[in-house]
Each structure stands twice: as C-alpha cells, then as structure tokens.
Image (cartoon, grey):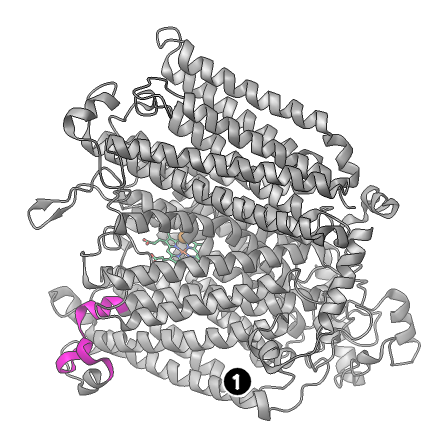
Amino acid sequence: MANAEHGSSMDVKGIWRVFFVLLLITVVEFIIALAIPESVMPQIIKNVIYIVLTILKAFYIVAYFMHLKFERINLIYSIIVPLVFIIGIIAALLYESNYWLNIR
Amino acid sequence: MAHSATEHAHGHDHHEHHDTFLTKYVFSQDHKMIAKQFLITGIVMAIVGMLLSLIFRIQLAYPDEIFPWMETVLGKWGKGGKLDPNFYLGLVTIHGTIMVFFVLTAALSGTFSNLLIPLQLGARDMASPFINMLSYWFFLTSSVVMLISLFVETGPASGGWTVYPPLSALPKAMPGSGLGMTLWLVSMTLFIASSLMGALNYIATILNMRTVGMKMTRMPLTIWAFFCTAILGVLSFPVLFAAAILLIFDRSFGTAFYLSEIFIGNEALSQTGGSPILFQHLFWFLGHPEVYIILMPALGLTSEIIATNSRKPIFGYRAMIGSLLGISVLSFIVWGHHMFITGMNPFLGNVFMILTLVIAVPSAVKTFNYLATLWRGNLQFTPGMLFAIGLVSLFISGGLTGIYLGNAALDINLHDTYFVVAHFHLVMGSAAMFGMFAGIYHWYPRMFGKMMNEKLGYLHFWLTFAAVYCVFFPMHFMGLDGVPRRYYSFTGFEYMTEWVNMNKFITLSAILGSMAQLIFLYNFFGNILKGKRAPQNPWNSNTLEWTAPVEHLHGNWPGDIPHVHRWPYDYSRPEASTDFIPQNISDEGLEERLGGSKTIETPSHQEIPSAKSSADTMLFSRLLAFLSLKRS
Amino acid sequence: MAQQQLSVKSKAIWDGGTEPFGASYGKLMMWFFLLSDAFTFSSLLLAYGALRFSAPVWPDPDLVFKGVPFMDHANLPLVFVGIMTFILIMSSVTMVLAVEAGHRGAKNEVVKWMLWTILGGLAFLGCQAWEWTHLHHDGFWWGSTPSAEHLKEFFAGNPSQDYAQQFANLFFTITGFHGFHVFSGVVINVVILINTMKGTYERRGHYEMVEKVGLYWHFVDLVWVFVFTFFYLV
Ligand code: HEM
Ligand SMILES: [Cu+2]
C-alpha cells in the first residue's frame, strides 16, 4: 500500500486531537466576536486575528486531514507554491478596490 | 507494491480488448486516436474561423460596395449585399474566440500533448485514458455549441473575444448580447472543463509515467513545454470559470457584480454597485497566461524540430527549460498590461509595466537559443523546419512590438488600435499557427504512418509566410496613425480614409493566404490514404516516438517499453557512426554500433541507420558538430 | 513495501519508472484538481472582497445572521452558523476515520464512517437550506432586498439598498456554489459507499478511492472555513 507507512502518523487519537484543535480555534473566534466589545479591540484588529486563525485552521485541515504534511516534499511544494499567485491577485485587487471607493 | 502491480495488470488487460468501429474511431481511449480527433476538429474550426475573417476583411476593404452573394450566404445579415454592422462585430468576436480557444489552445495542445506525451516519454497511454476521452468529447460539444451560436436569431456574441461587461452582462445591450452570449458562456464552460481534464492528465502522465531513465532533464523540450502549458491551464482557467459564473448571474439573476451606474436611455439601471474592472482583472488573470498556453506548445515543437533538422544539440537546454518556467511564473503577474487605460489604478499600472518588461528576458533567451542552434547547423529544410524557422521570425517581429505596448505611456496611444492587432496576430496568431503547421508536417508520419508531399509543403510555407507578413505588418502603421480596432468601416472618418487602399491590400493578401491553406488541406487529407508509407524514422530523430512501430497499436510498443539512456539532443556526436543517437541507445549499444554491426538490439530499430550516412556527409556533419560542441 | 522505501531513500525518484511524488496518478489528478478549484473559490471570494472593499457601507453580519431554528425572533448572532461549522468539521473527522479504516482494510468500519460522513453532509445542506429560507424571509435574495424600513435593522450605520443588494447577491452566489460542492460531495460519497459495500475495493486490495473522495470532502470543508470567516466574522 503506497500510503501504509503514513497511516501510523495519523491514528485515531491523532485525528481527534486535530478535531479538538479546530474546535478550539473556532471557539476562540466566537469569543472574540461575541464577548469582546469594539472598544477593547477595534474591528480591524479582530479581522486580522480572524484571518490568521482561519489560515491556521486551513493548515490543520490540509496538513492532517488531507494528509499533505506526510506526503513527499515535492508534492507539498507543488500544492503550496502556486497559491502565491492568489496572494498576488489579492494584493492587486485590494489595492484596486480601495481606488474604486475613492473615485466612486 | 501490490498497488502499482495491480495498476499495471489493469493497464494491460485494458489494451487487449477487441475494437469495434465505435471504440476505435469514435469513443476511442487511445491517445493517438484522440490526438487525431483533436487535430481534425481543430482544422475544421480553423477553417470556420478563417472564413469568418474573410467576410469581415472584405467588408473592411470594400465598405461601400454591394456584394449580392453576401445576401445569398448570410441571409438577413447581408441584406441588400451589405454586411450588417452588428453581425460584423459578431464575426470578429467568434473569429477571435474560435482561433484563440478552439484552434490554438485546444487543438494545438490537444493534438500534440496527446500524441507526444506518452510516445516521447515511453508510456503506454495517458494516465487516465477515460478522462482523456471525456476531454475530447467536452471539447467537441463546446465547439458545436459555439458554432450553433452563429445561427441564432439575434446573432452570436458580439462584444469581442474578451466579452467585457456591460456588453456581455446586459442581455439587451446589443443584439449579440442575448442568446448568442448565453451560448458563448455555455460553450466556454464546457471548454474549461475539457481543458482542465486534459491538463490534469498531462501533468499526471508526465510526472508518473516516464519510462526508466527518462529523468526530467532528459525530457524533450516539447514535453517541458506541454508540462508548463498544462500547469498554466490548471491554474488560470478556473479564474475565467469564476468570472463566467458571476457573469451568468449578472445576466440572468439580476445581480450587479460587474455593473455600476449604467443608464439606458435616460433611465438608471437598478443594478449597480459592482465594477466592470473586476471582470477585466479576472479575465486577464486568465487571459495573459492563456496567450502563453497558446504559444508555449508551439515553442516546444519548434525546439524539437529545429534541433533535429539542424543536426545539432539544442543550444542551452537548461536555459530553455528555465525560460519556459520563467515565462510561466511571470505570465501570472503581468495581466494588468491589458488594462492600462481602462481606469485601473495608475500606480498598479506602473507595477504591471515593470513586470511586463521583465517577461521580455525569458522570451529573448528562447529566441537567441533558437538562433544559436541554427547557427552553423547542418540544416535540413523540411517543410516542418521552414515553419519552425518561420515561427522564430514571427515571434521576434511580434514580440518586439509587445515591448512598446508594455509601456504604459505609449499604450495610451496604441491601445485598441490596429497596432495591438498587429502585435498579437504576429506573436500569437501567426507564430503559434506556424508552430502547429511545423508540428503537423514533422509528426504527420507518426500520426498517420504516411508522408506528406514536400513540394506542396514548400509552396504552402512560402505563400503563407508572405501572406502573413503582408496582412499583419501594415497594421502597425495603421495603428500608429490611430486607426481603432473593431470598427465596422473606416469611411466615416476623414483621417482614416487614406487607409482604405491599405485595407484592400491586406484583404487581398488574406485571401491569397487562405488559398494557400487549400494546398495544405489537399496535402493533409489527400495523403492520409494515398500518401507514401512513412519509414520508421523519417527525420533521423532521437526521441522515443520514432522507435514505436509505424502502424499504431494500443500500448505503443510491442513487448517492453524502451529504456532511456541519454538526453534527446545527441546529434552529430563525433564518437558515433551516425549523426544521431536515439535516446534508447545505451553507451554499450553505441560501442556495438561502432564495432561495425549496424543492427541494434530490438528489431523495430532496424531501419534507423539513415541514408545520409554516406562518408562525405558524415565527415561534414561531424566537423560541424565538433565546432558547435566546442562552442556550447 | 520494502521496494517502495528503497526508492524513496535513493535519489532516483526522478529517474523515470517511478512515482516521484509517491502518489498514484489518480491522487495527483485529485490534488491538482483541488488546486484548480481553490483558484475558482479564491476568485469568487476575491470578487466578494473587492466589491465589499469598494463599498462605502455594508450590512453588519451580526445583524443579518442572528436567527436559530425553532427560536422565533432569536437574537443569537453566529450561533447557527457555529452549529453548521461544527457539523462540517465533524463530517471531515468521520471522513478521515473512514480513510484510516480503509488503510487497515476494515470494510465494515469504512462503511460506518462513510455513512456518518454522508449524514453530516446532508445535515449541513439542511442547515444551509434553513439559512437561505430565513434570509429569504427577511427579504434578501438575488436581485431583491428587504424593504426600506426593514433595511435599517441590518446596518450598523446608514442603510443602503444598493449594498444590501450587493451583499445578498454575493452571499447567495458563493454559499450556493459551495453548497453545490457539498451536494456533489455527498453524491460521490454515496457512490463510494455503494462500491465499498459491494466489496469493489476489497477485491481491488486497497481503498484509495476513499482517500481520493476524502481529499475532495476535506477541501469542501476547507472552503467553508474561509466562507465562514469572510461572510460571518469579518
Ligand atoms: C515580449 C513579450 C510581450 C509583451 C511585453 C507584450 C505586451 C502586450 C501588451 C502591453 C498588450 C496590450 C496592448 C493593448 O491592448 O493596448 C498586449 C496585447 C496582446 N498580446 Fe502581448 N506581449 C508580449 C508577448 C505576447 C505573446 C508571446 C503573445 C501570445 C502568444 C501575446 C499576445 C497578446 C494578445 C493576444 C494581446 C491582445 C489581446 C486583446 O486585447 O485582444 N503577447 N501584449
Ligand atoms: Cu498579455
């Protein structure tokens, strides 16, 4: 089995551990959203935290559930590196949309 | 290894089933047949695209004349012998769409990726023959839908091949924005599915199915080009897909993703708050990689053909790979150069300008490497070689103007004029078409087991070459004079009337050029049945596809797949007895050959030693090889 | 097995005749397909981001998404979507468990966990249907927004018909596209479940198909994580 050797790195206990990490991150997001008032933490900071936490969640899903962490490094790179282009278009469009707002 | 063993067994019994007409020619899962299907569908689409362009070229050359046949052929679109202006726009749009997507994207990579990836890598077939077949059938369906859109009551999509909103987003904007545009979107959705399935297959095959010894750095440059092309396709077409989804919603569900502050008559449209620039960003994020999706396979074919027919190792193999990779990466970050004056943030324009000019570097690397490979080669002027050299010429002439256009300041004058038309027809339209012709002439023996007529090939080349330059070169001057593209007629503007004669010249050249294609069609279709039987290795080439039997069989090679011992460009090596050493010859095999026996291990190679190995040519080519090897 | 490890350790993985990524072609195609799909979703979310950024005002998510089933006039922002998120993550977990069982060749366990996964997918779709009806009730839909006096309820500051509309359009389109992915995932999962029960994979000697649909299923979960953040939190 091509992947039998990876199986041991993701046993049932490990799976549930990842689940609890994901749950925990989501709970933290809820606490920030519901329990911390704007005056303590402005929305912009909240947003940054949300995005960081989201990327963290994405990491756990891709690395453990999708098993990418245990694949060969080649595969990891060829999935992760192209995402750089998305960052490029995000940067361009955020800059653009700000400009649209200014000329609206 | 139970896993890959079963995979293998699976692969084998797959090849042994019996063929009916339907499974052999129609629902074939054999990559060689699928390649031919792509090619022939592509040729049909190219003929349609060419005919459309002739109609609108005639309109541009003779804007005031009455042509009774127009009414006969076009019906209500040619009322009274004059072309309908809306239909003119439809013709331009569908011509662009067909040529860009259906001919130069799908038919070019579809044909040659399918044919060459398994054969040149030493694989029995594509990774997933079934998905490969689906890819063709989606392509065929999308072609049919696109052709049907020509016949709808309100005309085909007419907003240009870039389908910018609002013309494409408001069904009432112009006649072609109605059903024609809907069909365009349906067709493109199918097309994207097809190209995705094809590209995934190519990538998986190239990664996993190379024969023993076929390192990545021993792959022919064709395969490298197809590989990069497939990657570009996988990453850029989904963005067009997303753009198309949003467009469909704007058209049919009353959303306003791309619509902002539009007035129809005096009334404000209720759909507002979006941005048409958003569409342009998404479109060109695909659009620029797309032009390289078109060009790179042609460049790959050219590399192979030029090296083979110069009887020289390709100059700078690794630099060629590097430039392919460089072009691939850069092509994702320059899309804004199509939008300099559409109201994009000027600062962003600067960024895109700089990035755009950088892309000239890898392009230049490729050009210089071609020239250096040709330099002092023992040139064999086959028709394929002529077309390959033609590609280099066109790539240079068209690429240079790209650098002008890449300057945001110059582009203010040049954007949307005939200068742009000249640029992309030379660098993309004609160059990629030449690459495709080169590929067809070169690999026709492999595809059909027959030879094409050389003399007709020469005639075809020279007429086409002359016509292409006569058609597109003068457009530069028109563009510099400010003549805009996509105009129905130039008689309404005083300053443009002086160009009417030029337009006549262009149109006549275009008609001549189309005639030349008849020669090609005759040569192509005529020889499928009647042609001379192809020898095993007509061009004395090194790559693996020429070791497979001339008559196609499922699984490509009888018996074992050849192993690979060297890179594909061992031409004119001084230590060899012939001026080429196929990739499957090991160093021991080479010594055996030198030791006098001209037969090599497997029987299918018996015909390899070429007619050209007479003593004097050998000496000559060895000398040249010696010189050029020292040089590189 | 031993052979495999040998070829991993030696530097020859790129020499041809091997699988350089240690993954079968089918898995590679699934991965690259998902990469491609990631670009589709990113483009959609990007369009959302650009349109929202260029808007002077935007509905406040806490005021829009505050309903919970069976609790009329509830004012509990995020609670319901929290439940949806939990369901989807749970179904991801059961999917990994199915894959894990597949590695051990435990057919009955695969069946069990696939069933749970399908159930999770259906539950998620049900929740989404409820969420859509709820918003529809409020007056949001493609091309329609709540009436002017109701609109105030959804904005923290000045209400705007145009941008409420823009919000509704984007919300329904993007969650709809995601929901469509969930739906296709459920269908594929059912097919795989049937094949498992018929013993197809047992005969084949491996459960790689389960792994491949697993990848797809987790991807759908992954996209939801982003949709959740950008529509409900930010
Ligand atoms: C040296 C490299 C190149 C540069 C710097 C360059 C630059 C540009 C620029 C700035 C434009 C926009 C012109 C305008 O609309 O005002 C343009 C248009 C275009 N280029 Fe290039 N280009 C290059 C090479 C290529 C290649 C290799 C291809 C195709 C294989 C290509 C295909 C096109 C097409 C199709 C358009 C026109 C699209 C349209 O508006 O319909 N270009 N190019
Ligand atoms: Cu471009």
Subunit of label 1: B
B560, C198: nearer the viewer = C198
Tell whether A58 sits left or right of B188: right
Q: Image height check: is B157 above or below B357?
A: below
Tell whether B561 sits left or right of B113: right
Q: Image height check: is A63 above or below B420?
A: above
Q: Main secondary structure of the magenta part?
A: helix
B577, C176: nearer the viewer = C176
Residue holding disc 1: B524
The reply to whether the magenta stretch includes residue B76 is yes
Residue B211, how many percent across, how many down?
76, 61
Residue B128, how many percent across, how many down?
64, 61
Q: On the image, which quarter does residue C168 sit in?
A: top left
Residue B472 seen anywhere in this rendered image of the structure: yes
Q: Image height check: is B419 above or below B57?
A: above
The reply to whether the magenta stretch includes residue A46 is no
Q: On the image, which quarter does residue B388 sit in?
A: bottom right
